[in-house]
Image (cartoon, coloured by chain):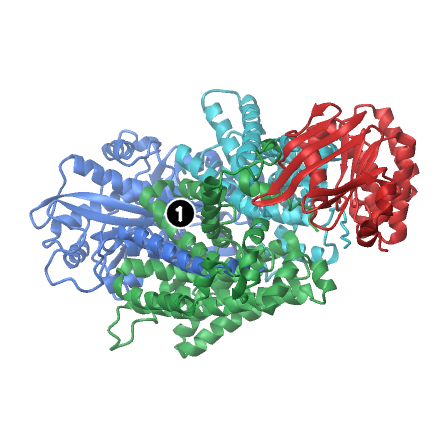
Chain colours: A red, B green, C blue, D cyan
Amino acid sequence: MTLLELEDVTASYGPVQVLDGVSLSVPENGAFGILGANGAGKTTTLRAISGAVRTGGRIVFDGKDISGMRPDQVAALGIAHVPEGRGSFGDLTVRENLRVGAYLRKDRKGIDEDIDYCLDLFPNLQDRIKSNASALSGGEQQMLAVARAIMSKPRMLLLDEASLGLAPSTAKNVYDAIRRLRLESGIAMVVVEQNANLAFTVVDDATVLETGRSVLTGTSAELKGMDEIRRAYLGG
Amino acid sequence: MASSSKTSVPTTSAPASSATSSPASSFRQSPWVRWGAPLLLLVGLAVLPLVMTESANDTLARIGVFAVAVLGLNVVMGYTGQVSLGQIFFLGLGAYVTAYGVSQEWNIVLVFVLTCAIPAVAGLLVALAAARLGGLAIAMVTIALPIVGVPLAKRLSDFTGGSQGMSARFVAAPEGSGLYDDQWQLYLVLVIGGIVFLLTYFLVRGKYGRAFAIVKGNENVASSMGISPYRYKVLAFTIASLIGGVSGFLYMVVVQYTSPETMSFGHSIELLVAMVIGGAGSIVGSILGGVFYVVVPDITNAIDPSLTALLQGALLLAVLFVLPGGLVSLPRAVMRGLRRSSAGRGSAAPPTTPSSTPGSGTAAEQTETERHGHA
Amino acid sequence: MNRHFGSRHAIGIAAVSALALTLTACGGGGDSGRSGDAAEGAPSPGITDESVTLGITTPLSGATAGPGTCTVAGVTAYFGMKNAEGGIEFGDGKTRTVEIEALDDTYDPQQAAANYDSLKGDVFAMTAGLGTPTNRAWRDAAIADGVPQALIMTGDPIFSDTDESPMQLGFVPIYQNEGEAFGELLAGSTAEHKVAILSQNDDFGEGYVEGFKSAIEGSDNIEIVQELTYEATDTTVDAQITELASSGADVIFNAMSVTPLTIAALQKAQQLNWTPNWFLPSNTSSPGAILEPGGAAAFPGVYSVSFAKAPASPAFAQDEDVVEYLAALKEYGNYPDPPAFPHCQWSWMVGATLEQAFAEMEEPTRESFMEALRGIEGFEAPLMLPDTSVTTTEDGQPAVSTVVVQKYNGKGYDTVESFE
Amino acid sequence: MEKFVQLVIDGLSTGSVYAALALAIVLVHSATGLVNFAQGGMAVLAAYVAWVLTNQGVPLVLAILASIVFSFLLGAVLERFLMRRFERGDPDTAVVVTIGLLTLITGIAGWLWGYNNQQFPSLFPLDTVSLLGVSVSIRSIGTTLVIVVAMVAMQALFVGTKLGLALRAVAINPQSASYSGLPVERLLMVGWGLAAVLGAIAGALVAPQLTLTPGMLDNALVYALAAVILGGLTSPVGVVIAAWLIGVLENLAAVYVGFIGFDLKVAVPFILIFVVLIVRPQGLFGRKTVVRV
């Protein structure tokens, strides 16, 4: 059962065309990777799904056409976006950040339980629960961003460059937690990564974007086996 | 300003590589145009004072005064990103130094040098302390300059003439020049102001300008590149103060009178408005800002003197609403409008999410610049 | 980062459009002849056989817009009324209507000078504008251009000095006169007095204090116990009043020109149970706008100096001058409410005084006008109080230099001869 | 000693005037990340609305309530139709827009109601009570109490409620907030509306003392801004305390520090700001923000 489907999606900033017909589909409980160089349109694809850029083409989530919706409306349908650069609320504490993540929910008890779950998933945040987000390290901010997204109890997570600017060991920690989250919750994911090695630890299928269009799509195993992928994205 | 970089980068990044340049830019590269256009401008400016009416000369001279003041503000704010609400103080200081020097019958060249030096030193001292702060804090320290400057000027009445102010008529046209006073004054403004603009143009294009831009963009990045944000903030503030002092000299050339009212807080705010309306971080924008500062009160007075505040506010909002990048972005906005209307092609698919990007065009481009908490 | 210099032609376009803007903005001024090329005896600019145009630059917006608006309203109302009656008869036998061109200078000297520059080619004379720095800014230029700067609203003495200011004449009493008048009254008192001074930190306040001090010099019964200042931009003078109250003074000489601060000062003193005799200048002593809200009846005596009838005072409610004036203000002055500032009255008197000068002016020239303006003696302008008059023949004095001291009676003012 | 206490009390009362305006500035800053120079102008407009209603015979309290409703709508409308265009652009431009708004509003007030000083009826009587041996007017006490209530309410809103949290989140990072499902545009309108409401209360409180004119709050604006910076931009309690501090220290410096005097006392808050910011860049009570690359 397909949860998210993009059909020939286009987008542009002013006169500059950024997406030139991207198509992909993610099944329920699936995880899909988007690989590609800087400026290939990876981030814009996620922004297109969230409704943060104007788009052409069709975006269908759970059988419903969501193109044209505002980001908050998209979020209300159950898509949580972890933006590039983490998007933390610097002047809010860690706990407040998590509460903002749960803005759409009304079940107080469930919220408290999920905060506990997040702190279990990211034990580093436990000690910093009263700190301002801006006082966290880069890795902790990334964990907070993922945790904030979880707090909305989404059906799908959009994860943008979660390893960017992190030390390799920290990045691995983050991805370990994401994998655990996927196993335990079954949330579907679209993962944008430059570091394909990390992405492949989580995703089942992936596509490679070049200048705004998909040039290659396949399963993780297929892609990992390809020479050009290995050279360009796997550092070997 | 994020929008502007996208469209104009190609023209600036490779001015030398004429091989790839478009016909339009090769037209600009032709030596006739390269040298002819500025020369024509120069000749135009040299002739203009002789043919215009007295009141037009006078208005142009006042535009020159405030264009220089706005230019100074641009150095510290438009180019270096430090909010200064005190620029008018340096204009006032320069005007007082000039008035005092003239009243003591000092040599006018010495007076001019002092008019540059004293505000620059004052600016340096303020900056040494204030540049440690950032963001709104530096704005508040600079706000204090006009606020404290006005009562200070009254208290130092031995030098300033107190609240009655000082007159200095020292710029009568020289005997035998055959010029009227207004023509001579305008020439002085054009020459001195022109030199200041030229020097600033080279400054902001050169390595200092690049450093200013990096400091403006991100101080942490600047530090990591070995550029001391503190040093460059102090430098920018000092230069801005010096230019402010020069504008004060020109103020005395044109207005020939100064009083504490000259440096009141309201005028400092008006300079800031003029800078943004003209176009922040732009040499041409500084001139347009000067035009706005001087011409708008005249226009609103001509429409209805009892409604000047209402009309000025409405005009300001209207200009920024249409041109958030300031008047200097008008040609670009027009070009964009033309391109959009002529090319109704479907490259950009029909906008299907109008609500997520309010305000159409510019806002759409600016979605890239996210606001972060004040650092 | 050099993006703004990308296109050279942009600079050119901008410069040209800037010039175009400028020229259109100035185009209205027409061919303003350069100063000094008028031939002898030929009519000056701004006057024809049918009409004469007067210029005003005054604050019409910003902090001083209240009194500034009044300086235009009064004189506009006066000549509006006269024009409706057919115009004014000039000394050269012609009857002319009088047009007013007023511009807003927001109390900015630079803008005032600019306004003068744009008006000087079109107007016969400048008049009635409010403010010391704003009038000083173009005083020299007016002298050089030979443009009269007549009957302006500033108590700065320089405008009444014929040598220094040949083309100028102030209208209202110089500040020193007003301070002096009260000082003389106090010096004549039989009792001992301790005086506290609170003055505005500018030439207005200084002038008042100077005049007051010169009048009490040598009087044994007067002692100044404390002297403080405030800024016109202050939001409160509570601290000053508190400090002065502790000085134990029984008289406060309060040279204040800001309406809300004057009210607040009166209220604060009452809260502190300090009820001295109070002196207020002519421009902040309106019974309706200041003394009543300030609760001035609580003080043993509130004194002011004046030369104009206060329209809000019940004593003058039926006065012919006042009735005519208020009606004209409403009809021709665009000022529907009774004004809170005396400047409206003064500006009305400026109109009447100008009419006197016009009647004596034998040639339609600025020189002839200045001569006529300086020849008025003992003219009792409408709205003037008994014992005051317009006299322009005395060098060093403005058109109105006589004031009477008045005491608040709970509703309006009574003229007083001695301090009790 | 009595004089000293009286000066302190006077300073608190003056500080409350600055605090009223400063709170509104903090509210709009917390909710939109913008310093709104037009805040005072909007408050004056609200006061005029109340004044016009009282002249029509409407009881004062009802007139003020009506002006509060008017202000909420005004704030929301201004955000929706004017400020929204600038909210994601250059912050300097947005600030200049608020300056233009201030000029426009002042001009409109002058056009509609002239520049005469108008008497605005006071909610509290002008009678005085004796406190610690010095006299304090009931009006001052009332004003101060209302400010304190407003301050506590605001603090509670920001720290204790979901709406307050959402407003702050939107101000800090609107993009991220919308990804979390926050209706950013509606929240910005609400933020402006609430700030205008606070401004309306401030206007009604200080109008009796300053007398109603189009530029009534222009001079207070600079002090309010100083209090906002000194208090730390994000803390309602901080800015109120800062405003009081400014009012009191100004008075004391003018009276007890000879060379400052009443003419240069305006320098005191700025020297204070400077010293405080060197030591604590986040202001007296602001939360610490550490920036990492």
Residue D289 located left or right of residue B97: right
Q: Position of residue C394 (x, y in %)?
A: 23, 59
Q: Name the spot of residue D283 as percent of width and height, x first.
A: 71, 50
Q: Horizontal placement of D190 versus B263: left or right?
A: right
Could one spot residue D168 in this view of the protein? no
Q: Is residue A191 left or right of residue C175?
A: right
Dot 1: what SS?
A: loop
- As drawn, C125 above or below B97: above
Q: Residue under label 1, please give it.
A: C281
- Residue B131 screen position, x and y as percent: 65, 62
Dot 1: chain letter: C
Q: What is the tally of numbered marks visible in this picture?
A: 1
Asked if residue C414 is positioned above or below residue C132 in the image, the reply reads: above
Quadrant housing the N terminus of chain C: bottom right
Q: Residue at x 42, y 36 (%)?
A: C289
Work out whether residue C65 or residue B281 is closer to the camera in this orientation and state it: B281
